[in-house]
């Protein structure tokens, strides 16, 4: 009965949303940083108070419902939501009801800065930046170059769509949208039947494929590409050994370019699965010349972290103050498990000591996981809360921990996750109330759990 009640309590907050679809056309002018769109949204999920999200650099020419122009209310962002949502514009259609088969058509355009090889943005790079540089356009789903949906009442956010889009970019030699293979040429008709966070990478670059990996704008030779494909395959096989996935579609690795400070890219990449954007140029130095394997632990950490976002960050995610925990902390915990699996317990424990359990970390105070009141910093997201999850593993065992992770991947639909959501998922997955209380007392209700993790 306890498990049944926990499962019902957890399921009550899930949303079984249908996947909306985007159809239409995008026109790209690389020289002037201009984007023009004529896109239609269909297959709407049920939303109480829907709004359309677009990048603030976009200007709407027309909004139509089923072929008729309609008015809309304009809002400056979504304060209190995740950071990338707070920087968008919200357009609330003046309609009494948006039905499942309603067709909303948006025509809009926007112009963005273009940067030369030596130019950088002082505020730094990010997933929310529409970046034109070196005759390439890079835009993830968090830029809202293509529209997203948000329900103001429930906080449900949708950035994953199926799509049927024609791209026209006269200066492009290659065009890629996440979920389909890259295409040679200045025009592309791209269709995805499975939902994807739309990642656009278009411009003047070459691409190639090795195994199950596309390499976009990469200077890696064929031998290095084979080594990286093998490393990614190992990471994905490890995750699939305990996490449910319905596909094994190719991963696309795209070369990042320095919009921000060059030092930013030493330890930073981002994922809009199945695409990972990173500094591919450094990989050739991180492959062992004798074995041909990716033996650099930190490079392995970076790419296994980004691959983990397929599960946590893109599948299981939160649009409130806990977004960093469910996206980054879980992905970091998973990449540490991948490192342990690949390099062994000694290398895993060495990395914990040198990166997460330092003397400085052991001496400071941290925010309790169940008491978030404001946006958490990177130290909590990438360093401390992954150790809290390691503490949960230490409390319940690796088998129960992996069972919990898979339960979340298979069952969580809500995007309004918080601490209570984790607790209910843990109970529903079979972790006992006694073990959860032990975990809370040892790793949550303390200013610093790191000593408990290391037995110090």
Image (cartoon, rainbow, N blue to C red):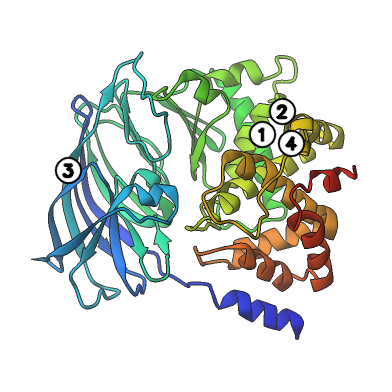
**Mark 3 or mark 2, earlier in chain:** 3
- Report the residue at 56% width, 23% height from top: 266
| Res 56 visible | yes
Which residue lies under the disc numbered 3? Answer: 109
List the single residue furthest toward the left: 69
Q: Distance between the residues labelled 4 and 3?
A: 47 Å
**Mark 1 or mark 3, earlier in chain:** 3
Which residue lies under the disc numbered 2? Answer: 297
Which residue lies under the disc numbered 1? Answer: 301
* Side (left or right) of 185 relative to 351: left
Which residue lies under the disc numbered 4? Answer: 361
Label 2, secondary structure: give it: helix
Mark nearest the camera among 4 and 3 is: 4
Question: Picture coordinates of residue 284 (x, y %)?
Answer: 60, 17
Q: Do the residues labelled 1 and 2 touch (CB within 8 Å)?
A: yes
Q: Quadrant of the N terminus?
A: bottom right
List the single residue furthest toward the right: 455
**Mark 4 or mark 2, earlier in chain:** 2
Q: Do the residues labelled 4 and 2 touch (CB within 8 Å)?
A: no
- Report the residue at 74% width, 32% height from top: 360
Label 4, secondary structure: give it: helix
Q: Distance between the residues labelled 4 and 1?
A: 20 Å
Label 3, secondary structure: give it: strand
Label 1, secondary structure: give it: helix
Mark nearest the camera among 4 and 1 is: 4
* Side (left or right) of 299 relative to 43: right
Question: Picture coordinates of residue 368 (x, y %)?
Answer: 68, 54
Look at the picture and state if 326 lies above or below 123: below
Mark nearest the camera among 4 and 2 is: 4
Q: Are marks 1 and 3 in contact (CB under 8 Å)?
A: no
**Mark 4 or mark 3, earlier in chain:** 3
């Amino acid at each position: 009965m306890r498990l049944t009640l926990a499962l019902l309590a957890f399921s009550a907050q899930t949303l079984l949303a249908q996947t909306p679809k985007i159809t239409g056309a995008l026109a790209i002018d690389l020289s002037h940083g201009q984007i023009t769109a004529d896109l239609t949204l269909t297959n709407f999920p049920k939303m109480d108070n829907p709004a359309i999200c677009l990048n603030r650099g976009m200007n709407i020419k027309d909004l139509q419902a089923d072929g008729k122009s309609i008015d809309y209310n304009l809002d400056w962002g979504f304060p209190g939501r995740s950071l990338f949502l707070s920087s968008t514009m919200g357009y609330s259609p003046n309609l009494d009801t948006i039905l499942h088969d309603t067709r909303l058509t948006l025509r809009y355009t926007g112009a963005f800065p273009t940067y030369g090889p030596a130019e950088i943005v002082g505020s730094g790079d990010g997933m929310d930046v529409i970046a034109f540089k070196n005759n390439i356009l890079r835009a993830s789903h968090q830029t809202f170059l293509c529209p997203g949906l948000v329900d103001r009442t429930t906080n449900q956010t949708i950035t994953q769509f199926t799509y049927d889009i024609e791209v026209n970019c006269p200066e492009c030699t290659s065009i890629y949208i996440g979920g389909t293979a890259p295409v040679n040429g200045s025009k592309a008709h791209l269709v995805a039947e499975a939902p994807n966070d739309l990642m656009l990478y278009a411009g003047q670059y070459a691409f190639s494929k090795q195994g199950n990996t596309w390499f976009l704008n990469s200077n890696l030779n064929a031998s290095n590409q084979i080594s990286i494909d093998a490393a990614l395959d190992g990471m994905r096989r490890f995750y699939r050994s305990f996490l449910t996935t319905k596909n094994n579609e190719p991963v696309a690795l795209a070369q990042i370019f320095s919009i921000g400070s060059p030092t930013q890219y030493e330890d930073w990449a981002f994922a809009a699965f199945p695409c990972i954007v990173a500094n591919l140029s450094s990989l050739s130095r991180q492959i062992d010349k004798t074995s041909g394997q990716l033996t650099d632990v930190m490079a392995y950490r970076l790419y296994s972290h980004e691959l983990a976002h397929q599960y946590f960050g893109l599948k299981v995610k939160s649009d409130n103050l806990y977004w960093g925990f469910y996206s980054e902390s879980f992905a970091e915990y998973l990449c540490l498990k991948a490192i342990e699996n690949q390099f062994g317990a000694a290398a895993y424990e060495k990395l914990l000591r040198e990166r997460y359990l330092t003397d400085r970390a052991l001496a400071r105070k941290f925010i309790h996981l169940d008491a978030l009141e404001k946006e958490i910093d990177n130290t909590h997201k990438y360093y401390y809360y992954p150790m809290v999850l390691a503490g949960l593993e230490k409390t319940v065992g690796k088998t129960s921990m992996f069972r919990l992770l898979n339960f979340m991947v298979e069952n969580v639909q809500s995007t309004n996750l918080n601490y209570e959501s984790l607790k209910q998922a843990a109970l529903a997955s079979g972790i006992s109330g006694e073990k959860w209380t032990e975990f809370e007392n040892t790793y949550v209700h303390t200013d610093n759990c790191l000593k408990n993790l290391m037995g110090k």
